[in-house]
Structure formats: structure tokens, C-alpha cells
Image (cartoon, helix red, strand yellow):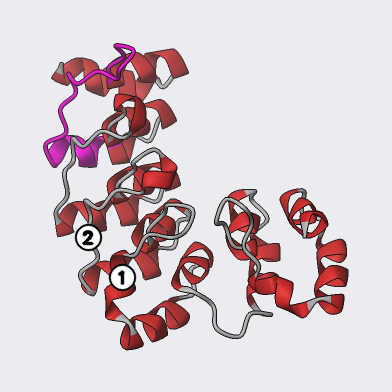
Amino acid sequence: MKEFFDAIKVGQAEIVDQILDAHPSLASAVNEGGTTAVQLAQYFGHHALGKAIAARVKDLDIFSASVIGDVDRVVAVLESAPHQIDALSRDGGRPLAFAAYFGHEALAVQLLKRGASTTASSAGFGGVQAIHAAVAGRVAGIVSAILKQGCDVNAAQAGGFTALHGAAQNGDLAIVQMLLAAGADPTLATEDGQTALDLARESGHEAVVELLSSVN
């Protein structure tokens, strides 16, 4: 099994295919950290490989379906098991956070319509809430949808990072503007004392620096 997961990490699709041809059940395998093969491929940026592995799984779980943005499969799971909408994966993530982080806007919107929590934290990923995941995913439409649904815009993940810190560090001006309009506090500092302005300046994002300087 180690060879299989190692091949996934480095994106060796041919080797993964060969292993799965010989051992089909490994498509549903979970590593020692509780991560499925599909999730692992996504985490390492091998999106086509993740979908290829998913295609070999008969009953894809909601977490694997969420990381690849499979709306139909997620909806099918929720129709039979609605309680899974805010379920925590074995490696500590939630469906909405996965959809938001990987930029699957249609899925994120569907989950929000079905009542997914915007404040449930993902313990295995630094305590991120949906808004943090959306900011990290850098899809403005998802950020907007979560803000409209209602969330704790000033919630902090590990290290004291708020969504505004993340957006400022990334230089995503439109997202910074959205967060400020929703009540994000630009004076909040991370555990090491950095404000969103500090992070934007450190990363060289002049437009964000100018905006945050005007509201501080």
C-alpha cells in the first residue's frame, strides 16, 4: 500500500493505474492519517489523477466527492444521509471546507443551500472554517456565497489567522474588499503580531496595502 500512496503523492498516474489494475480495492484505500486515495491526489495537486481514482470507486464517500467537486455524488449521499453535510472526515476536514478550498463553486453553493454550517471548524486542518478555506481557494464567488449565508468573518484559525489575513497575504483585492464590507476587523493581529496590512506589505501587494492603510 505504501507504494500506491507514494505514487499518488508524486503524480505517477501510470504506476497508480498499474497498481489499481492489479488491486482494484485500493481505490478506496485510506492511509494511516485517515486520508483517502482520492483526497491525497487532490492534496498534492494531482487533480486529474484524483478524478481517475474516484472513477474506480463504486460508492464514493462524501469527502472524496467534495474534494473533486462531484455535485451529483455529494447530493446522492446527502439524500440518503443528510446528517453527513457537516461530517468530519477521518483526516479532520468537512465537505464545505473541501469544496471551498478546491474552488468548486457549484458544490459549495449546493452545500450552503442545504444548510451546511459556515462555522464548523476542520480540526485536522488548523481549525479552519469555511470562510478560511474559501479565502485560501481564492474563488471570489465562493467567498461571497459564504458571506451572504452568514459566517464569523473574524474567526481565527491556527496562528490567529483570520480570513482577512489570508486574503491580504494572497493579494486578493476583491476578496479583501468583500471581507471588509462584511465587517472584517483590519486591526486584528496574528499570534506573532502581524495585521492584514503587515502581511500585504510583506508580500508586496500594493493595491491591498493602499486599501488597508485607508481603513486602519
Nearer-the-camera pick, 79 or 123: 123
Asked if labels 1 and 2 touch by Cβ distance under 8 angstroms, the answer is yes
Q: In the rendering, at what x and y percent does residue 27 appear?
A: 69, 72
Taking the spot 63% from the left edge, 74% from the top edge, the residue there is 54
Q: In the rendering, at what x and y percent does residue 193 appear?
A: 29, 11
**Which of the labelled discs sits on residue 117, or is there none?**
2
The residue under label 2 is which amino acid type? Ser
Quadrant location of residue 11? bottom right
Main SS of the magenta part reads loop
The residue under label 1 is which amino acid type? Ile
Residue under label 1: 85
Q: In the rendering, at what x and y percent does residue 153 appear?
A: 18, 40
Q: Where does the magenta region start and end?
A: 176-195
128 to 27, vertically: above or below: above
Q: Is residue 2 toward the left or the right of residue 131 in the image? A: right
Indicate yes or no whether the magenta region holds residue 207.
Answer: no
Q: Is residue 146 toward the left or the right of residue 15 in the image? A: left
